[in-house]
Image: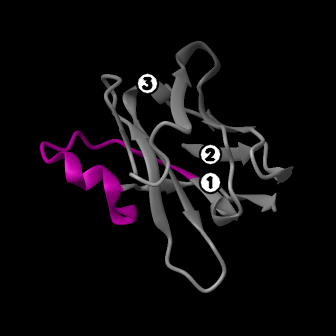
């Protein structure tokens, strides 16, 4: 499967953005999907994920502000980001996995995902 992320941009603190991750090939609902981000000089970190069955997980830093969703008909996963803060500035990556992990913590690790999009830059100004 190929993933294409889009929707990044420059936004003021307190603003919102919606990222999209479009998948080609196999139906996206058969994948677990995740969003990760990487700021300059930092490691890639987990943001949020959605399992094949629809269960979602989110990092504490984004709970209540970011929401992951999936449109199976469009083969697209979304990341709705509200109340953005300067510390949210990063390149955001979408990822997909064919695996169904019994341990929920697996969805928090980049190594659990086989497919990655190219990344989209999100910059939040203060």
Label 2 to label 1: alpha-carbon separation? 5 Å
Residue found at x 75% / y 38%: 16
Residue behind mark 3: 29
Is the residue 105 above or below the residue 16 in the image? below
Q: Do the numbered discs 2 and 3 sit on residues whose CB atoms are within 8 Å?
A: no
Query: N-terminal of the two: label 2 or label 1?
Result: 2
Q: Where's the N terminus, which quadrant?
A: top right
Is the residue 51 above or below the residue 97 in the image? above
Dividing the picture into quadrants, the one containing residue 78 is top right
Mark 1 surroundings within 10 Å by alpha-carbon count, few (fewer than 14), some (14 through 19), many (20 or more): many
Q: How many marks?
A: 3
Mark 2 surroundings within 10 Å by alpha-carbon count, few (fewer than 14), some (14 through 19), many (20 or more): many
Q: Using the image as rendered, state which of residue 58 and residue 60 is in the foreground.
A: 60
Q: Using the image as rendered, state which of residue 66 and residue 48 is in the foreground.
A: 66
Q: Residue furthest top?
A: 73
Residue found at x 31% / y 28%: 55
Label 1 to label 3: alpha-carbon separation? 17 Å
Protein image colouring: one colour
Q: Do the numbered discs 2 and 1 sit on residues whose CB atoms are within 8 Å?
A: yes
Task: Report the magenta residues as a range.
Answer: 94-112
Residue found at x 39% / y 52%: 60
Indicate which disc residue 117 carries: 1
Residue 13 at what x, y percent from top left? 77, 52
Q: Residue furthest bottom?
A: 41
Q: Relative to 68, is 91 on the left or the right?
A: right
Residue 70 at what x, y percent from top left? 53, 24
Q: Do the numbered discs 1 and 3 sit on residues whose CB atoms are within 8 Å?
A: no
Indicate which disc residue 3 carries: 2
Q: Using the image as rendered, state which of residue 120 and residue 124 is in the foreground.
A: 124
Query: N-terminal of the two: label 1 or label 3?
Result: 3
């Amino acid at each position: 499967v190929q993933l294409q992320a889009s929707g990044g941009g420059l936004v003021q603190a307190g603003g919102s953005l919606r990222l999209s991750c479009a998948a080609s090939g196999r139906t996206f609902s058969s994948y677990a999907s995740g969003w990760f981000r990487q700021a300059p000089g930092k490691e890639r970190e987990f943001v949020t994920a959605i399992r094949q069955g629809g269960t979602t997980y989110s990092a504490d830093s984004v709970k209540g502000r970011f929401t992951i969703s999936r449109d199976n008909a469009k083969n697209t996963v979304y990341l709705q980001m509200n109340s953005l803060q300067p510390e949210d500035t990063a390149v955001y990556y979408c990822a997909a996995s064919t695996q169904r992990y019994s341990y929920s913590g697996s969805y928090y690790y980049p190594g659990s995902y086989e497919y990655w999009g190219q990344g989209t830059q999100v910059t939040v100004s203060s």
